[in-house]
Amino acid sequence: MGSAGCFIRNPGQYIVNMDRLFVIKIGGNIVDDEVKLSAFLKDFAAIKEKKILVHGGGKLATRMAGQLNIPQQMIDGRRITDAETLKIVTMVYAGYINKNIVAQLQAYGCNALGLSGADGNAIQAHKRVHTTVDYGFAGDIDIINTNLMATLLHQKIAIILSPITHDKKGQLLNTNADTIAQETATALSSSFDTQLIYSFEKAGVLADVNNDDSVITEINPASYNKLKEKGAIFSGMLPKLDNAFRAINQGVKKVIIGKAEALHGLLNGTSGTTIVNE
Amino acid sequence: MGSAGCFIRNPGQYIVNMDRLFVIKIGGNIVDDEVKLSAFLKDFAAIKEKKILVHGGGKLATRMAGQLNIPQQMIDGRRITDAETLKIVTMVYAGYINKNIVAQLQAYGCNALGLSGADGNAIQAHKRVHTTVDYGFAGDIDIINTNLMATLLHQKIAIILSPITHDKKGQLLNTNADTIAQETATALSSSFDTQLIYSFEKAGVLADVNNDDSVITEINPASYNKLKEKGAIFSGMLPKLDNAFRAINQGVKKVIIGKAEALHGLLNGTSGTTIVNE
């Protein structure tokens, strides 16, 4: 995929052609909707560049917890992962959702392979330490195994990451999928010309949260500060944008936020909000 | 691992050193027992040769189906896999059990990677066709992706196979784990010096099914026929032995049947029943 890559001068002073890589996160509302998910996966399968898909869980884990009478506790929008809840998210995210996505992509002619963070030690994390809240088996990321991921990508395999990591001491951990996408894109940006895409139910970052036609097409650090000062950004978007700037500041080429249904538009820059560094 | 390999003359007339590969199936009773499973995985992690572990499901899927009020139907010892049951076995086998095994192996210093048949198109199957019984989403194997498996094995990655396959048309399928072990060992026997190990709760093939000291140490085709004529083999063992001879006849070097707790004894030939071709 030389034509899709870019040329950079590396520290060894010779020219390296880096392949383009798309790291794409899909939101829970797409995972929950069979028809939308299938359409999205068809678009994803058609991407010719190297690609990683990161999925969350949607409502299935909550529904399953309800059927099994396991009460769910949320603090600040984060699920408290007790032992029984960890069992459910491992089954639902790393099992049901991940394997169904992989099987559908195979049907669309895309050779996909699903990984949890434990598989091949893909993503190592530690149990979250917090002064006041016990999040249970929630994991914060330590290391992304870029060797494993690069090896699979170079074999034209699309990697499908479920948001379950491990601590290399035998403990699985529930990890935020947005953060997995950002950390994975960042870690791979030294080997690939990497773009990070957050695809969800909105058309992008909106000037008016109720108007899908009010997409802010580009945000840089200066305009981000102004928008925040004006209180013009919906508070739910702030963690995503902070993640985006963290990625941009650490080597990711571009971050694009927009509608899952417009995947090709997001990739070619005709849809969504693009986060840039200057 | 040259010392563990063997020399054969391949069709190209040059000498090839084949690495040794162990394909090991663990029975459901080991998967169900946390202490036994952990001890087994410690032994498995210590194996220096290339290795693949195939696991079934144990009783967790049945228990989960009970909790979710999904009635389970068995015909001739085989689970009828309706759509809801497929969902459960995908969650339990490919999710919960597979990822917990992988995480434990990582803790024991073994770089393991879990695969369903859909991942990397590892195992392609078709929905079982049967004249009188509708087994539902039960899969019979068509192709093992030996390229993918060899690539992972050569990177010193242990492959952990869950008994979920796919049809490459988007459908996941529930597949017998004994058969997966046999077909995988057979397919890889042209690239590796392959041994297939069925580890379960008995010490081997027993002359007296109630006496663990009555292990028949070796069975070949002639002695197998005699034992069958005498009715000296417990009927539950017959499918395993038929699978074993099928593997032996198609290139697998040795098949060993015995107790999971005696894994090293099974590998070095001091425990269990060895199935040979002559």
Image (spheres, coloured by chain):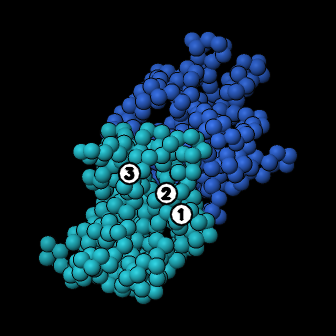
Chain colours: A blue, B cyan
Question: Quick check: can you spot residue B67?
Answer: yes
Label 1 marks a residue whose chain is B
**Residue at mark 3:** B75
- Residue A181 pos. (x, y %): 57, 41
For badge 2, the amino acid type reads Gly
Label 2 marks a residue whose chain is B
Mark 2 surroundings: few (<14), some (14-19) or many (≥20) residues within 10 A: many
- Residue B265 pos. (x, y %): 46, 84
**Residue at mark 1:** B31
* Callout 3–callout 2 Cβ contact below 8 Å: no
Q: Quadrant of the N terminus of chain A?
A: top left
* Callout 1–callout 2 Cβ contact below 8 Å: yes
**Residue at mark 2:** B57
Does B222 sit left or right of B124 as displayed?
Answer: left
The residue depicted at 68 percent of the width and 23 percent of the height is: A223
Label 3 marks a residue whose chain is B
Mark linked to residue A55: none
Mark 3 surroundings: few (<14), some (14-19) or many (≥20) residues within 10 A: few
In this view, the mark in front (3 or 1):
3
Mark 1 surroundings: few (<14), some (14-19) or many (≥20) residues within 10 A: many
Figure label count: 3
For badge 1, the amino acid type reads Val
Question: Quick one: SS at disc 1?
Answer: helix
- Residue A186 pos. (x, y %): 57, 45
Depth check, front residue: A85 or A80: A85
